[in-house]
Amino acid sequence: MFNLILFGPPGSGKGTQSEKLIEKYGLMHLATGNILREEIANKTALGLSAKGFMDRGELVPDEVVIGMIRSAIENNPGIRGFLFDGFPRTVAQSVALDNLLAEKDAQIDLVLALQVSEDELIDRLINRGKTSGRTDDVNENIIRARIGEYENKTSPVAGHYSKSDKVVKVKGEGSIDDIFNQLTKEIDHKQN
Ligand code: AP5
Ligand code: MG
């Protein structure tokens, strides 16, 4: 298996680049934010429990997202690999993910960390909020709350994986194609 984490703050381009990477490498996209928004749209109990946190720009509790990832890994045996987008977002989630993969004799092979300035993140998300319908893009306060959660709780995840030298920083500003080329260069280097 080849398992990749696409890491970065809200608006750094994780979703945009994931779409292209899964196609090129035949990985399965596991994006906890997308799964949660689907649960909300389907008005499931899980979705209802997550909605308040998401609307405020806060992380949903670890148990909820870890359970979602556990099911996804268990329901997809024999897969080439997973691309994790928006997960893990706390050190506790990283430890849980490492354990789930170890049960399959697998591991995280690479963490690609997109680097984007805070001003650019806010511009991108305010802009997307005009048309996306995402309730967490509607105003700058919620966007800043998301970035605050990232700085406090999520950035330590990079520290967790840098202990095993798995983290590579990639500039996340510029054209989508140039960023994609940098990401593929790092993946190809790791796979060879
Ligand atoms: P989630 O859905 O993961 O959102 P996010 O991390 O806040 O990030 P986004 O999806 O907004 O940004 P992105 O990095 O994917 O960038 P994108 O490609 O869209 O999480 C939402 C919420 O769910 C969380 O706040 C939390 O409540 C909950 N949640 C999810 N996972 C969780 C977890 N594991 N634990 C706890 N809670 C969890 O791009 C952004 C914009 O920029 C787009 O408009 C795009 O077109 C544009 N863009 C992309 N690339 C470029 C470029 N190179 N130049 C210019 N514009 C660009
Ligand atoms: Mg996204």
Image: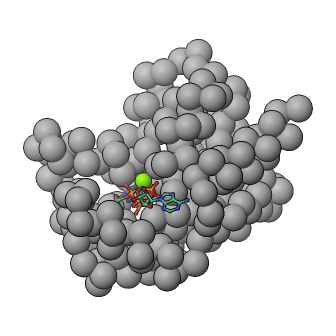
The residue drawn where x is 73% and y is 41% is 184
Q: x, y (%) of residue 23?
A: 56, 28
| For residue 11, above or below residue 2 | below
Residue 139 placement: quadrant: bottom left
Is residue 74 visible in the rendered image? The answer is yes
Q: x, y (%) of residue 150?
A: 49, 72
Residue 45 placement: quadrant: top left
Q: x, y (%) of residue 88?
A: 52, 54
Task: Say how the picture is coloured.
Answer: one colour
Q: How many marks?
A: 0
| For residue 151, above or below residue 64 | below
The residue drawn where x is 52% and y is 53% is 14
Residue nearer the viewer, 61 or 141: 141
Is residue 110 visible in the rendered image? The answer is no
- Specify the farthest residue to the left: 43
The residue drawn where x is 34% and y is 45% is 34
Picture quarter with the C terminus: top right
The residue drawn where x is 40% and y is 31% is 71
Would residue 105 be found to the left or right of residue 185 on screen? left
Residue nearer the viewer, 95 or 69: 69
Residue nearer the viewer, 14 or 177: 177
- Specify the farthest residue to the top: 78
Picture quarter with the N terminus: top right
Q: x, y (%) of residue 97?
A: 57, 45
